[in-house]
Amino acid sequence: MDRYVIQTNNDSLPSVLDVHVNIGGRSSVQGKMKGRKARWNVRPSDMSNNTFNPIRAIVDNMKVKPNPNKTVISLSIGDPTVFGNLPTDPEVTQAMKDALDSGKYNGYAPSIGYLSSREEVASYYHCAEAPLEAKDVILTSGCSQAIELCLAVLANPGQNILIPRPGFSLYRTLAESMGIEVKLYNLLPEKSWEIDLKQLESLIDDKTACLVVNNPSNPCGSVFSKRHLQKILAVAERQCVPILADEIYGDMVFSDSKYEPLATLSTNVPILSCGGLAKRWLVPGWRLGWILIHDRRDIFGNEIRDGLVKLSQRILGPCTIVQGALKSILQRTPQEFYHDTLSFLKSNADLCYGALAAIPGLQPVRPSGAMYLMVGIEIEHFPEFENDVEFTERLFAEQSVHCLPATCFEYPNFFRVVITVPEVMMLEACSRIQEFCERHYHCAEGSQEECDK
């Protein structure tokens, strides 16, 4: 073993460093490391351990197989492209082809998106009630990343956020992975899934970082009225709580309803509105979303904007090809495309609601937009099943119809139906659900007279 003495003039270090160099192949480590036996100790991070997706946990644990004599009808996946009956408009596809052929969009863009693309989004959503400029737009890799960035910029570990019940499971998945507590406020099925505002306000405390409002709703298919949105804003203003508005289904409402962007009704409450191409343009796999920053009273100041920019730099922005196509997508998609999509969804929603409402033991709630409806199970009339998970498992096993149990959305004894499937498939699914319910339905004790009606 050779020994070297190194002199140093750095006052913060010892004047002499002893460095032992192994020449003969055997190492010697002095101090704390002496005698330590090296061993592997690789463990997953707290963030990964705290990341939990209830939909995947429930669906992946379903061990039942479908009825081999019946083709599977999946009413469980919120992807409108699955069955091929809802293609995007040719103008949207052509915009992507043109962007690719141009060769202009193969490199890195700014992490918040090209300035020209952000200008297009700002122009598309700008209105007098909620003005927007390019500086108010952050482009993201899908609406999911938009939601993630908003939660990350607004909340610290130990704080809490308010999310709807029933509600999109990703809010909890993202928040708890960051060490943020989740509090659930109730939606009321008897009021077309309006928020229980008193219960909501009772949850707010000095650690509440934001209120998440999803309108139109996944999983409910509900659309809040202007008056109800104003009441939500009044709570937020009273309690000084900013709002994360998940508006990915914005403008996807049926003809008998009207969509009101939350920011158009607010002057005092700062709002981060999340949206994207996925649903309205029927291209969820293209992964382009955005955050619209509405802050008319400068409550966020520069800090929140700067924070969003910093967080966006973690993955250097969304796909540049889609960004390059964005101008043509927003400007050239014909109104007929939007109209035809919504006409189909409303027709399927009416068909499904009417069929399921006629089945004893089921209580569907009529939707007003988005791509879903929720169906209540009068579980006391199905004594073979303890809950919605068992009900939907047996439905799949016997009828090969796959619906998501609403336990996935924190709302037991309901299930969610996706209404994007072809009409003939929807009719067949409803027929099978009816057959299943008729087979397993039992009158509750003491209600035989009611059943006989």
Image (tube, helix red, strand yellow):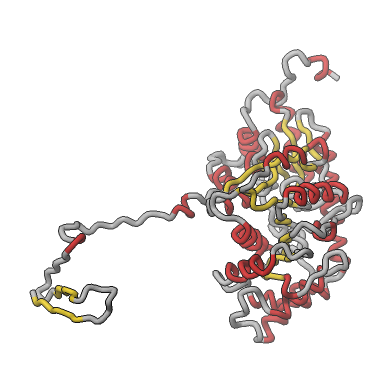
Say left or right for 107 vs 260.
left
Residue at coordinates 72% horizontally, 41% vertically from top-left?
A: 200
Residue at coordinates 64% horizontally, 60% vertically from top-left?
A: 150
Q: Nearer the viewer, residue 447 or 200?
A: 200
Residue at coordinates 69% horizontally, 53% vertically from top-left?
A: 78
Q: Nearer the viewer, residue 53 or 247?
A: 247
Q: Position of residue 53 (x, y in %)?
A: 56, 49
* Residue 137 in which image quadrant: bottom right
Q: Nearer the viewer, residue 244 or 363?
A: 244
Residue at coordinates 69% horizontally, 63% vertically from top-left?
A: 300
Q: Nearer the viewer, residue 406 or 354?
A: 406
Q: Position of residue 227 (x, y in %)?
A: 88, 48
Quarter of the picture containing the C terminus is top right
Q: Residue furthest bottom?
A: 103
Q: Position of residue 423 (x, y in %)?
A: 80, 50
Quarter of the picture containing the N terminus is bottom left
Rendered view: 140 above or below 242: below
Q: Position of residue 371 (x, y in %)?
A: 76, 52
**Residue 392 visible in image:** yes
Rendered view: 356 above or below 173: above
Rendered view: 201 above or below 40: above
